[in-house]
Amino acid sequence: MMIGTATSVSVSAWEASASQALKAIARNEKMKSQVQRGEGLYPLLSSAARRFVVGETREEAISEASELLLKGYGVSLECIRENVRDVRDCISAKDEFLAIIRTVGQANLQSTVSLDLSYMGMNMDPQLTYEHLLELAQEAERYGITIMISAEESTKIDQIINIYKRIGEQYANVGITLQAHLHRTLHDYLDIQAYPGKIRIVKGAYQEAADVALPRSEELNERYLDIVEMVAASGRQISIATHDEAIIEKVVKKGYLQQPNVEIEMLYGVRPERLKELKDEGYRTKVYVLYGVEWYLYVCHRLAEHPPNIYKAIEDMANFYAETEKESLY
Ligand code: FAD
């Protein structure tokens, strides 16, 4: 999920060039392996990563999720994985998601589980991915857990929608993420309208060509709100997944967030203070909690998306050396 990035319209020239540099760092395999092998560097950078990724293990994620649930937030859990090389990787990803579902279910935690179909080999063997998702959906249904399929690059959307529809015919506990920036999304929504699963609406993180998607703009915000209006009015479960204040203000003003089928969902570590305010005002809020060892790309992109986060990363690293106890962001 969310590996790509997009630049806010309001960033300064400095921020734009920092953002470009971070995207280059994110793509640099040599740098990534230096970080992962560097004995001094790894713990330092992982202390900065902890703002966005709760830990490397499932246990750490479940522990953070339990605390968030106790505080009154909803939670989505995802294990960050990277490139799938062979069928063994697909099975290992499926097994990890199965383990999350069972752990969450047996602990009676009301958490959603999110995943990319690419983690389970969609590009290599869509039938195998379908079978894996079916197995996960079946297990999740036993515990009343919702699975959310993440959105990926535009070239993968046909396959994602196909698999979603095959599963949606059998399981209502599987939902899908739609990207407002893609020109095709309205058509996709109409295509899946008859299926019962929840819909998460995001702007879209991947860089796409102009004939495929809108850049960050007023026009994109209007389109985002049009989709929210349409889905919220249908009465189905909907997650408004954004950190954009302009959109948040409008969904509150228009009363969507007051509807029982609507929640607002933000990524762990991004605008936690705003999500807390919304929760304290009584709205349904959800935190998207990520864990895993493959955090490098994800964290670089969270910094690139909002370069002032670099200051926070420096602060987190300084606190790591000062051995300052990490305070909860929520
Ligand atoms: P933007 O226009 O990008 O940002 C608006 C404002 O929000 C910024 O000006 C800034 O004030 C604030 N902000 C944004 N990002 C940050 C940040 N990192 N740190 C601090 N402030 C920030 N994308 C996909 O392509 N596929 C997915 O499956 C997917 N799933 C997601 C699930 C959730 C729950 C969320 C919240 C996002 C998901 N995304 C996914 C990412 C999404 O597409 C956007 O890239 C991301 O949310 C940033 O867009 P925005 O709506 O916040 O608006």
Image (tube, rainbow, N blue to C red):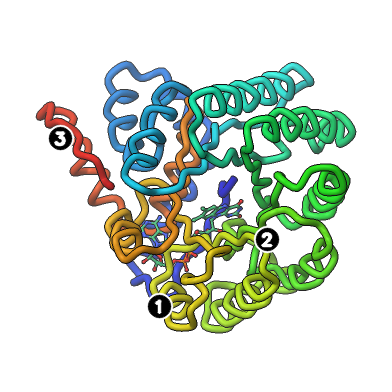
Secondary structure category for the residue under label 2: strand
- Say which amino acid is labelled 3: Asn
- Say which amino acid is labelled 1: Glu
Secondary structure category for the residue under label 1: helix
The residue that appears at 78% across and 28% down in the rendered structure is 135
Which disc, if any, is residue 178? 2
The front one of 93 and 273 is: 273
- Distance of label 1 from label 2 (alpha carbons): 21 Å
Q: Earlier in the sequence, mark 1 or mark 3?
A: 1
312 relative position to 278: left or right: left
Q: How many marks?
A: 3
- Distance of label 2 from label 3 (alpha carbons): 38 Å
Secondary structure category for the residue under label 3: helix
The residue that appears at 28% across and 47% down in the rendered structure is 330
Where does label 1 land, which residue? Answer: 249
Where does label 3 land, which residue? Answer: 319
